[in-house]
Amino acid sequence: MHLMYFTEQPMSAYDAEAGLKYGATALTFSNRHFDPVAGSRLYGEYLEQYVYAEEVGIDGIMLNEHHNAPFCMQAKANIFAAVLAGATKRVKIVLLGNPLPLSENPIRLAEELAMIDMISKGRLVSGFVRGGGQEQLATGVNPAYNRERFEEAHDLIIKTWTVPGPFRWEGTHYQHRVVNPWALPLQKPYPRVWIPGVISKETIIWAAKQRYPYIALNTSIPQTKQIWQLYDETAATLGYRSGPENRGYLARIHVAETEEKAIQNAKQFMWMQGEFTGLAHPVWANPSGYFSPSGRRNFVEFAVGRAKNPRGNPTFEQQVADGMIICGTPKQVLSRIRQLLEETRPGIMAVWGNDGNVSHQDAMTCIRLLGQEVFPKVREWAKELELTSPFEAEAPVSIAYAKDLKRPVAAAE
Amino acid sequence: MAAWSESTIDIAGIKLHVARGGEGPPVLVLHRDNGAPEASAFHDELAKSAHLLLPHHPGWGRSSRAEWMRSVRDLAVIYRGVLADLGIDRPVLVGLGFGGWIAAEMATMAPAELAKLVLVAPLGIRPPEGDILDQAIVSYIDYARAGFEDQGAFDKVYGAEPTTDQLEAWDIAREMCFRIAWKPYMYSQTLPHLLGNVKAPTLIVWGDKDKVVPLATAKRYLATLPNARLEVLADCGHCADLERPASLAKLVGTFIAE
């Protein structure tokens, strides 16, 4: 089991009333409400929290990236990754991940990631994402070619890491005449790539085809089981058997010394009015051409307010009852985690511990309790349940490096 | 009402849907970015004195998508090919909004092979003041409504609550706009420099309440097209063909007959 700590790095010092009044807290919500003095303080606190996570025995720090929104202060995952490469000694630096389509130059990403891997002495896990719809709009990248750009940028980065330069890349979305960066990853054949996501079938199938672990981002237990079923079926057609080493799960778990304190802080998971990525117009999250055409009809109804939000809008109490938010003392959260482990069987688990206005002190307490009281027990159970991480399983970095492929049982999709 | 015959033209690997109707000189009418409604009083009126060709752009409506298509100039080249295939040497081009951009591009490619050019609030040039409305950040209905000064006219064309089929068509149309006109958004940086070759008589029509393309853009078109004049429709939005079909048809019909 690989156990990680995660926070969105909320820009919690903005004026929430101003957001409610404007009616959106993403994309076009003015950055006049961004306070760099508070931003500087918060970056310092987040860094202190990450370093502490290593001290208390957590295996990895999960980082991500978003744009134009108060819910996440990381505008560039690689910057915090580089900071952590120097500021920590042991933890894995897990990027979930770099939004590939946003990049006009994937070679630059390959260089940056190689530098982070070398500086950290081989502690990088380099996840890749498509980036949400709003990220495309915030960075001026065409959403209609998002998936094509994702796949092409991935192929280019992997080639850059594994084939000696110089070579030429004449692709559909990227053309590079001299690919030959003098920065290569320390880890061979290349750093592990994990793919976070929600329930996009295309992405799940793509990850399974690469044999990259898929990290389900706080999906419900039934949704998570469906994801693994699709992953497992795809794996079977390619001749390998997927298991816990192919599965990750991000859970929102806040731990405190008392139940009362834990509940009070866990309510901060709702600080963006219950939306993960802030209040936003549906067409920002799903610009035309960004989403699968199979979902078009349902989406257009939702976008004009005729259909309900497909995610629903559950209350805090409902989310706690459904296990979508877990909070309490270490003993209390452990029983919920045990259930999660048994039901979803991940080999990688990320804990989204703190959000919104949780104080620095309470965030540090949460991290200490996770590292010292919760995770040791989770590791014990993971052994019992044979929930092995990709590191423990020595799983191949990708299907191209697998030595255990059986004859495919059916044609791949 | 004109009798419309429908056909499919094979061009550049695309199945292009074209409706034809009316008697008179050939007029290619190019529809706007969010498609063409099935019935249009403007088309019916104009077809009384002209032979209209009404294609659906590749990827819009009933025409198949060209995965490779990357620019509005590509679209203009496709339509020049269509005209050549049909043996139409000197057409009148009527471009509505986004279609006006296509028509302007076509005019620059073969300035001698053009009878007349009509641009109705064309996109394609960066406005000297203000910006082209960004449809990416508003809903389908809000964007379509922004094309009308008179919301009653919108309700007449699309219904007060547009159907789900219409919403889907708008989403597809929007995706196509993104595919070929994402950046710069809905204009060309080179088009203004090429328009000087277009000697054909040109009529530019603009609603003075256009919220999609600022009226000031007309100045740049007038400054670059050597033989153009501007007619401004009072109290009219971007979609003059849908909001004021009779007035626009009269202006265009008279201009063609001149």
Image (cartoon, rainbow, N blue to C red):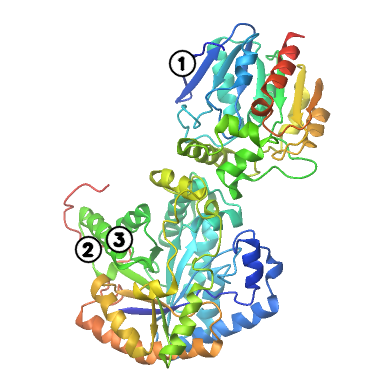
Q: What's the residue type where badge 1 is placed?
A: Ser
Reply above or below: A202 against B251. Answer: below
Q: Seen in the image, is A19 located left or right of residue B247?
A: left
User: Which residue is drawn at the image coordinates 16% and 54% (left, top)?
Assistant: A407
**Closer to the camera in the image, B68 or A295:** A295
Q: Any mark on residue A227, and which?
A: 3
**Alpha carbon distance from label 2 to label 1:** 56 Å
* SS state under label 3: helix
**Alpha carbon distance from label 1 to label 3:** 45 Å
> Do the numbered discs 2 and 3 sit on residues whose CB atoms are within 8 Å?
no
Instruction: Residue A227 in the image: state x and y as whole percent.
Output: 30, 60
* SS state under label 2: loop
Callout 1: few (<14), some (14-19), or many (20+) C-alpha neighbours within 10 Å?
few
Q: Any mark on residue A403, and which?
A: 2
User: Which residue is drawn at the image coordinates 34% and 53% (left, top)?
Assistant: A201
Which mark's residue is nearer the viewer, 2 or 1? 1
Parent chain of label 2:
A
Camera sees residue B54: yes
Q: What's the residue type where badge 2 is placed?
A: Lys
Q: Which residue is mark 1?
A: B7
Number of disc labels: 3
Camera sees residue A57: no
**Closer to the camera in the image, A413 or A82:** A413
* SS state under label 1: strand
Q: Seen in the image, is B71 located left or right of residue A30?
A: left
User: Which residue is drawn at the image coordinates 74% and 29% (left, top)?
Assistant: B194
Instruction: Residue B15 in the image: state x and y as whole percent.
Output: 44, 24
Q: Any mark on residue B159, and which?
A: none
Instruction: Residue A228 in the image: state x and y as whole percent.
Output: 27, 62
Q: Are marks 2 and 1 on the same chain?
A: no
Q: What's the residue type where badge 3 is placed?
A: Ile
Callout 2: few (<14), some (14-19), or many (20+) C-alpha neighbours within 10 Å?
few
